[in-house]
Image (tube, rainbow, N blue to C red):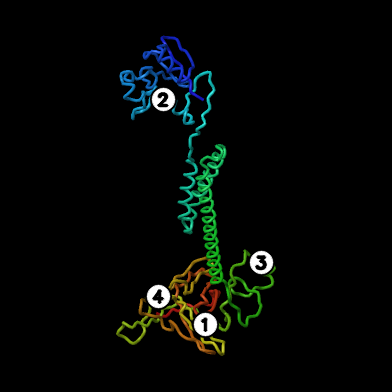
Amino acid sequence: MSRKFYYRRGNEIHGPVGVQELRRMANDGTLNKADHIRPDGEEKWYVVGTVKGLFPDPTANSASSGDRPAAPDVAPVPPRAQTPVEELSDAVRRGSTPELVHTPGLSTVNVLLPRRGSSLGIAALVLGILAFLFCWVPLLGAITLPLSGLGALLGIIGIVIALTRKGVGIGFPIAGTAVSVLALVIAFTMTSAMVAGIGAAGDAISEAHAQRDATNQEQVNRAATPRSETGDVESASQRSVRTPSPPPEPEWALADSPVKQDGVQIQVVTAEVGYVSVNDPTSMSDEPSQSNNPQLVITIKLTNLSVTKKLDYRTWAGGRMSFDRDFGTLQDNFGNSYKRVNFGIMSTPVGRTQSSSIFPKKTITDVLIFEPPIDAAEHLNLELPAKNFGGTGMIRIRIAITMVERSTGG
């Protein structure tokens, strides 16, 4: 269908008319070059004299009809841009539809929908790719959870918007959602595995600490006679008026009889406050020297009860370099802790066994040196790691203060 045009002469607007009608009016003088025309559907007016192809070419009449072919009715279009009339006429002949401009009172339909992208889909894809690159790393995987979650959310929103546009630009949202969800699943899996591993490691450490600190011993040859906290035998009247005891503390074996674990027997032989004899290899004398102040000396005897197993013992005085507890501790009933006493890097107290093998049915002794207890103390709790002789848990021995001897010798 041919396009229509309006023409304006002065203040009067006429039309619409077709292209052929405009040419006829231009040929018979009805349409002047000073008049204006505009295509139907547009608001811009064009001067008729600027429109090529409406008026006949004046050079056509001067040419010889016998020597030259007749000039065409409409001059050929020069290489430069076409005029509005020719552009619109050519578009109508080619079957394409130019962009229309809405004119009040006329209904228009734009059949060329603009191509639309999806910025949300692109953002989702970028976030998903970033999250996917780092979701495999256990620690960084937890950080990518918000990224992948946001990417999946933006992708879903982009898909919904694309569906409202009849699927235009849906590719990026689908790709962004897929990559973000995959990264989210991987990051969640890796983070869960890391948390589970940390929890298992924490449980293993707690279990190891519990086993290390557990009381693992058996009292040897002791009558089941009720005793007070100080180790003294309780009378019937004392038991009848005794107030309820506080929550039970770790089991402490009394020092007046040995304790054993597996095939090892441990016994506190003596506990004495006095001056300590010290072997000093740097001294010029062959005789041991004495400590400057009185200290608490606890002598311990270890017996290997097995007939087939050899034991390796390390002193409870503690090693000079240790990454775990390998020394004994001492505390009184008031909660006062007493420090271990050393006499220099090379000096050792007389009777100290730094390390030794305990063969079957054999016995060794060792001495532990602590600060002297306060006078008001009622008992002393000696705690010894069983690992020093290859055992497990702790050996806990309660020494009644009445068992501690005080030497006056200097």
Q: Residue at x 58, y 75 (%)?
A: 216
Q: Please tell me whether mark 2 or mark 4 is closer to you in this view.
A: 2
Q: Which mark is residue 129?
A: none
- Provide residue 286's location: percent of width, then percent of height: 33, 87
Determine whether, in the image, residue 307 is placed left or right of residue 130.
right
Say if 20 sits above or below 207 in the image.
above
Looking at the rendered structure, the kind of residue marked 4 is Arg
Q: In the depicted view, which residue is nearer to us: 111 or 90?
A: 90
Q: Is residue 73 above or below residue 398?
A: above
Looking at the image, is mark 2 or mark 4 earlier in the sequence?
2
Mark 4 to mark 1 CA distance (whole Å): 26 Å
The picture places residue 298, in percent across and down from the top left corner, at 48, 78
Q: What residue is rendered at 48% in x and 26% in y?
A: 100
Neighbours of disc 1 within 10 Å: few (<14), some (14-19), many (20+) = some
Q: Please state which of the two labelled residues, at mark 1 or mark 3, is closer to the viewer.
A: 1
Q: Secondary structure at mark 2?
A: helix
Identify which amino acid the numbered label 2 is placed on: Glu
Q: Pick out the residue farthest to the top.
A: 11
Q: Secondary structure at mark 1?
A: strand
N-term mark: 2 or 1: 2
Sooner in the amino-acid sequence: mark 3 or mark 4: 3
The residue carrying pointer 2 sits among few (fewer than 14), some (14 to 19) or many (20 or more) residues within 10 Å by Cα, namely some
Disc 2: which residue: 86
The residue that disc 4 covers is: 320
Q: Position of residue 256 (x, y in %)?
A: 57, 80
